[in-house]
Amino acid sequence: MKRFGLLSVLVLLSCYAMGSKNMTSKELALRGDGITLNTAVIQKAIDEIARKGGGILTFYPGCYLTGGIIMKSGVTLHLMEGATLLGSKNPYDYQGITRPKEDNAERDLTSKGLIMAVNAENIGLTGKGTIDGQGLALSLFVDSLHHTGEWVDPYYNNRRLRPSGSMRPNLFFFCDCKQVTVEGLHLRNSAGWGLSFDRCEQMTLRNLDVYNRAYWNNDGIDITDCQEVCIEHCMVDAADDGICLKSNTSTLCCRDVEISNCQIKSSASAIKMGTASWGGFRKVSIHDIKVSDTFRSAIAIESVDGGIIDSIQVENIHAVNTGNAIFLRIGARAGNRKGVLKNVVIRNLYAEIPFGRPDIDYDLRGPEVDFFHNPFPSSICGIPEACIQNVMLENIEIVFPGRATKGMAYMPLWRVKDVPEQIEKYPEFSMFGELPAWGFYVRHVRGITFRNISLRLQDSDFRPAFVFDDVEQLTFDKISVPPGTTKVFHAIK
């Protein structure tokens, strides 16, 4: 397609009908000065491209201020290097989309985004440009409107003193879309989650640079009840979870998801399945991931709302300065709904756990626990009514800080049954309080293999490396722990 040399303050609109020759290009009166609001003109162009059968809207270098825009089928936004879509700081410039009621909500939910799409197919955002949500200024404006009474948030979080997620726009919110491509862009500073995809299919997220640390709940990428998803070669630095799979509906699930060759930093968990886990997660492959400076878990897999987690493969993980390596959990936050977590392989993982906070350089840090504790082990914990099944851990090396003292906290082995079950609690590797192991704490599991495992200490720890409580069909092969330390404790039923 021929491109015409336009001034940097203009945008080339290339529209063509599917299966026919290119349509005539025309200039849009967009202003790339970062001051003029271009929402209406951009939306009109998107609507016109869709009406004519699809095409590409190319942004040349410049800074284009806009409120929320809605993508339509067949449309791709292409941002050239030096082009920035800049989100408005005014919350009135964003419209809301009401999502269908979900199992985890007592009300219909409203979502907002700088870039939105609903029931659209064959849509894309590509290029080497930037999309910046100006999330801090936007969130503070929303907060001010609540306190002045001009726009009261009925779900305002009074404990954390922040407006709810329904009031703060995400950078992206796509719902019920198919054939979605997001590639090459620099994505910055959402007021809420970064890239949020709900019930979408056939998605590719590739070569993205996601920096989302402007405000609270700044996840990087959230995939909710989506199928056939590829996330690869992305860099994610987020104030909340880095890449998070969720399931909000018991009749749906995340399925056929591949996450590979990504670098992740997070003030929460790097890669997480949950917390919302109503339908579950199936056939997920995670491999060749580098994690650093992450407060919580490198890998967290959680079924706490009755969902089924099955056929998960995690390979080639390198995590340094990370609060926890592995966290697997079944819970029952939804009353009688008991989850399933089975057929998980974690292979070729290296992790270094620091003594202090790994995210200390973040302006916004995840909330610290409110009790004295020694360094936490990795945890693999079901519940009495629902045991985790068939887990393989192979070629694992974890370096722990040690420095545990009984004066800081002490859960003696004769009291191992006093570790609380916390069946209805929010899942987190610190949820059980002080634990009696320094390497792995494993409870309510049927079928687990530890093969070629090396656990190292940088300082002494009085606890055993492994504690097993209500664990059956355990295979223990080629296990290395420091000389002079206790390797294993089995709780007696």
Image: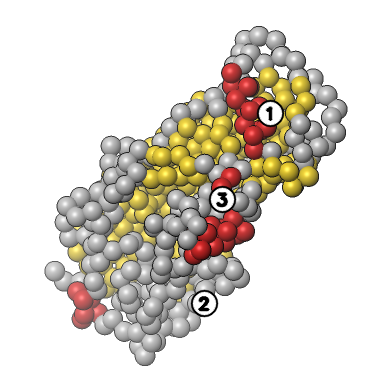
In this rendering, the answer to whether 230 lies above or below 143 is above
Q: How far apart are the two marked residues, 3 and 2, measured between alpha carbons?
A: 38 Å
| Structural crowding at the residue carrying mark 3, measured as other residues with C-alpha within 10 Å and reported as few (<14), some (14–19) or many (≥20) | many
Q: How far apart are the two marked residues, 1 and 2, measured between alpha carbons?
A: 48 Å
Label 2 secondary element: loop
Identify the mark at residue 57; answer none if there is no mark.
Answer: 1
Identity, as a three-letter code, of the amino acid under mark 1: Leu
Q: What quarter of the picture does the N terminus occupy?
A: top right
Comes first in the chain, label 3 or label 2? 3
Comes first in the chain, label 1 or label 2? 1
In this rendering, the answer to whether 147 lies above or below 220 is below
- The residue that mark 3 highlights is 91
Are discs 1 and 2 less than 8 Å apart at CB? Answer: no
- In this orientation, which residue lies closer to the viewer: 327 or 269? 269
Q: Position of residue 144 (x, y in %)?
A: 54, 62
Identity, as a three-letter code, of the amino acid under mark 2: Gly
Label 1 secondary element: strand
Comes first in the chain, label 3 or label 1? 1
Q: What quarter of the picture does the C terminus occupy?
A: bottom left
- The residue that mark 2 highlights is 356
Q: Position of residue 5 (x, y in %)?
A: 86, 27
Residue extending farthest top: 20
